[in-house]
Image (cartoon, grey):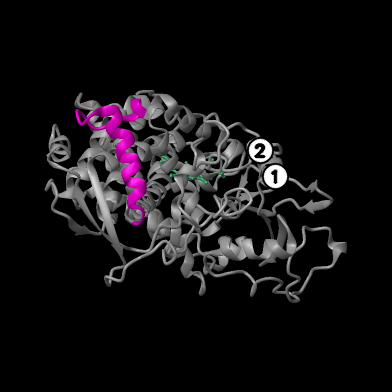
């Protein structure tokens, strides 16, 4: 192991090589696993240096709480991606650091997506979930069909977001706004990749577009048009609905209702798609995979729901407090494989001293949520999906359901999965409500089993694999799904969208 000299006073880390420093050490994918491994040598706060940037990695809950929560303002910055800014994404909240526009954006999105939002949109979320399960089961009780659940779960995540953001209802498989938003989002992700030299050397952004080597500027101009088209067409759609008196309540309708609204907030509405769809989809796919792998979890959850509703209806958000085991499933979905394993990197806005180390201004800060979620002292047998770890039952470990703040053992994973502090995910209430409704209705009405990869090889808990990326999703898988019985089939097909 190459250790860096103690004299630097940066948090410890591999020493790297002259000039390129840790460029070759930096893992190409699933970096949270490498960071977790490095923590065994360097500890819960460590650093590396890549392309002139200091990256500070926080592997422990104490470091995350003390730096990100208690020192919130210092670490509230986001990483800049000049190529994304040139490509029309400069008003995206997820790359905006504190300054003139951030407080306006945060206030708006926190209010629009606060706990009230969930109450207002609950019927729409409920209907979308039922619709999704009906499509997945094909409404045929006791006839199991083999499906790739990703297709319908993506449609569900996108339907919820487009309904809440614009009052738009997805009615077709190849929906125009899903396509438009996905194409635009692709340009965002591609423009944040390190292959664009301008992301490492921002000075290049001043090169005139006609110069040899300035291909990136012409590409950025093209992508900028795509981002603008997506933002404009969606918000104009809501404006037309408002003008013609048929707009459904939505975040965009609320915004457009104020004639003096700040136009920058139209981008914040658009951000909901990019930030909300892949994340909700990742957690939903993990839910299906975990249920398919654990029939006893489904049975216990189904019994819990059945005791409450007695076959008369499907459960809903109002039942939440009476369904502790279903709640525990959602918490374990957040923890077991993670969604955004290194959250969304932050940037230090000033030089700070912590635990005897210097964290320099502009350092990139990565919270390794994976390390926290897979610390065996905090979550015994961390690779096992065990919802009961959150429950005060004979096989559970919690002292009480209240899950006190200082209770480190099997702490509620919801506290971390959405990040922490001043930049915490504003979509958490919406996402959490969607996942609870999906989990409760799924166990109440369906039975899922036989998970395999796309070639038909069985998947076990130990062979589960996840794709790389800021948002990590299960590798594509198939499973068998059927409506639990004819009563469940009836409840799923009742009062549905066509
Ligand atoms: C299971 C689903 C989700 C997970 C796990 C998740 C997780 C996260 C995380 C870890 C962050 C970074 C927080 C930080 O830096 O501390 C974040 C930011 C964000 N999320 Fe979510 N998210 C989810 C769903 C959603 C939804 C449904 C929306 C909106 C509809 C949303 C909107 C945002 C936005 C706008 C940001 C950027 C906030 C900022 O930079 O100030 N997220 N999310």
Quadrant housing the C terminus: top left
- Whether the magenta-drawn stretch holds residue 315 is answered as yes
In this rendering, position of residue 159 left or right of residue 266: left
- Specify the quadrant of the image occupied by residue 265: top left
Residue on which disc 2 sits: 69
Residue 282 in the image, given as x and y percentages of width and height: 39, 52
In what element is the residue under mark 2? helix
Rendered view: 32 above or below 152: below
* Disc 1 Cβ-to-ligand 1 distance below 8 Å: no
For the N terminus, which image quadrant? bottom right
Q: Which residue: 42% across, 65% down?
A: 465
Q: Position of residue 394 (x, y in %)?
A: 50, 39
Residue found farthest to the right: 7
Residue where numbered disc 1 is placed: 62
What's the distance in space between the residues labelled 2 and 1, CA to CA? 10 Å
46 magenta-colored = no
Ligand 1 neighbours mark 2 (CB distance < 8 Å):
no
């Amino acid at each position: 192991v190459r250790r860096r000299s103690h004299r630097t006073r940066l948090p410890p880390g591999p020493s790297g090589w002259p000039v390129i420093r840790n460029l070759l050490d930096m893992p190409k994918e699933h970096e949270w696993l490498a960071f977790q491994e490095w923590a065994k040598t360097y500890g819960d706060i460590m650093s590396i240096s890549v392309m002139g940037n200091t990256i500070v990695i926080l592997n422990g809950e104490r470091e995350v709480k003390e730096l990100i929560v208690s020192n919130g303002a210092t670490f509230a910055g986001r990483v800049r991606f000049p190529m994304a800014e040139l490509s029309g994404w400069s008003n995206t909240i997820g790359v905006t650091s504190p300054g003139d526009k951030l407080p306006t954006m945060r206030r708006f999105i926190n209010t629009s997506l606060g706990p009230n939002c969930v109450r207002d949109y609950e019927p729409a979320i409920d209907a979308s979930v039922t619709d999704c399960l009906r499509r997945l089961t094909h409404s045929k009780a006791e006839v199991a069909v083999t499906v790739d659940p990703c297709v319908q779960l993506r449609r569900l995540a996108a339907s919820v977001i487009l309904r809440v953001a614009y009052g738009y209802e997805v009615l077709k498989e190849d929906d125009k706004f899903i396509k438009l938003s996905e194409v635009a989002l692709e340009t965002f992700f591609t423009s944040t990749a390190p292959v664009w030299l301008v992301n490492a050397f921002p000075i290049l952004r001043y090169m005139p577009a006609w110069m040899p080597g300035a291909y990136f500027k012409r590409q950025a101009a093209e992508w900028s048009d795509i981002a603008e088209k997506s933002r404009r067409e969606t918000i104009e759609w809501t404006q037309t609905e408002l003008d013609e008196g048929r707009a459904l309540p939505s975040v965009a309708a609320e915004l457009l209702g104020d004639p003096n609204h700040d136009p920058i907030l139209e981008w914040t509405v658009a951000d909901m798609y990019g930030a909300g769809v892949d994340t909700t989809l990742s957690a939903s796919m993990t839910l299906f995979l975990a249920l398919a792998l654990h029939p006893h979890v489904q049975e216990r959850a189904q019994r819990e729901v059945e005791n409450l509703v007695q076959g008369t209806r499907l459960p809903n958000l109002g039942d939440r407090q009476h369904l502790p085991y279903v709640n525990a499933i959602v918490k374990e979905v957040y923890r077991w494989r993670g969604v955004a394993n290194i959250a969304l990197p932050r940037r230090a806005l000033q030089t700070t001293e912590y635990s005897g180390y210097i964290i320099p201004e502009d350092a990139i800060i990565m919270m390794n949520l994976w390390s926290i979620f897979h610390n065996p002292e905090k979550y015994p047998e961390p690779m096992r999906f065990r919802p009961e770890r959150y429950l005060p039952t004979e096989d559970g470990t919690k002292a009480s359901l209240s899950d006190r703040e200082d209770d480190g053992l099997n702490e509620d994973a919801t506290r971390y999965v959405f990040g922490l502090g001043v930049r915490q995910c504003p979509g958490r209430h919406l996402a959490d409500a969607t996942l609870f409704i999906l989990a409760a209705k799924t166990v109440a009405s369906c039975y899922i089993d036989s998970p395999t990869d796309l070639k038909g090889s069985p998947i076990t808990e130990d062979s589960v694999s996840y794709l790389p990326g800021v948002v990590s999703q299960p590798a594509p898988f198939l499973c068998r799904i059927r409506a639990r019985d004819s009563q469940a089939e009836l409840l799923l097909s009742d009062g549905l969208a066509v």
